[in-house]
């Protein structure tokens, strides 16, 4: 009896799996062939390099201040040392805050990426959805990344 139930369950599973149509899409290839995506990517790279240079300049300034402090420390009073240390720490904090503002989880780079890439990705998603509806695909997978499912009905 157990064998019959098991065989029946396997047959039903095979029939239901056979009825679904799957499609594989290479999103990396699609994105590489969209000029708007390439332009948006280049804009993001330019902005990122500019902001990175600003952060590095502040870090370099803090480093220079620290080296000068080490050279002058012997000649400074305790109050002067404290003032120099505070100014160095403020400069380091300023650099850290700027880095977080530009490159943090909700930073400017993230916002610009969403603004530039969002419409392109939405357009691709709508095209994939339309084609999968027309051809009867129940699942569309991205073979280029680990993200997996692009569309499922």
Image (tube, rainbow, N blue to C red):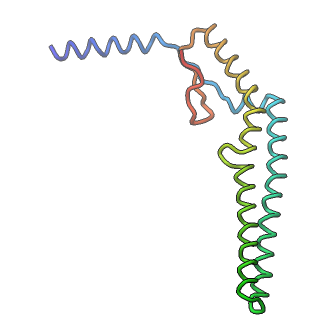
In this rendering, position of residue 84 left or right of residue 140: right
Q: Which residue is pictured at 76% across the width and 72% down the height?
A: 87
Percent position of residue 46, x then y: 84, 46
Depth check: 15 or 64 in front? 64
Q: Is residue 141 above or below residue 102?
A: above
Q: Position of residue 85 (x, y in %)?
A: 72, 77
Horizontal side of 98 relative to 42 (left or right) equals left
Examine the rendered structure and indicate whether residue 2 appears above or below residue 69: above
Q: Residue at x 79, y 55 (%)?
A: 52
Q: Nearer the viewer, residue 62 or 150?
A: 62
Q: In this view of the protein, which residue sits in the foreground, 115 or 28?
A: 115
Q: Quadrant of the rendered structure where residue 33 is?
A: top right
The N terminus lies in which quarter of the figure?
top left
| Residue 91 lies in quadrant | bottom right
Left or right placement of residue 85 versus residue 5 in this view: right
Give x and y (percent) for residue 151: 58, 20
Q: Position of residue 149 (x, y in %)?
A: 56, 26
- Residue positioned 83% across, 58% down in the render: 53
Along the viewing direction, whichever of 43 and 111 lies nearer the viewer: 111
């Amino acid at each position: 009896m157990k064998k019959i139930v098991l065989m029946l369950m396997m047959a039903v599973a095979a029939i239901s799996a056979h009825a679904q149509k799957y499609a594989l899409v290479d999103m990396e290839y699609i994105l590489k062939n969209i000029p708007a995506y390439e332009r948006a990517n280049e804009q993001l790279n330019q902005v990122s390099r500019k902001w990175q240079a600003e952060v590095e300049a502040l870090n370099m300034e803090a480093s220079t201040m620290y080296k000068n402090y080490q050279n002058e420390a012997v000649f400074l009073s305790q109050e002067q040392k404290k003032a120099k240390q505070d100014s160095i720490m403020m400069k380091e904090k300023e650099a850290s805050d700027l880095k977080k503002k530009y490159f943090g989880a909700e930073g400017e780079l993230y916002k610009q990426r969403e603004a530039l890439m969002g419409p392109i990705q939405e357009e691709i998603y709508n095209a994939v959805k339309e084609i999968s509806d027309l051809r009867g695909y129940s699942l569309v997978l991205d073979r280029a990344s680990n993200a997996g499912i692009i569309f499922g009905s």
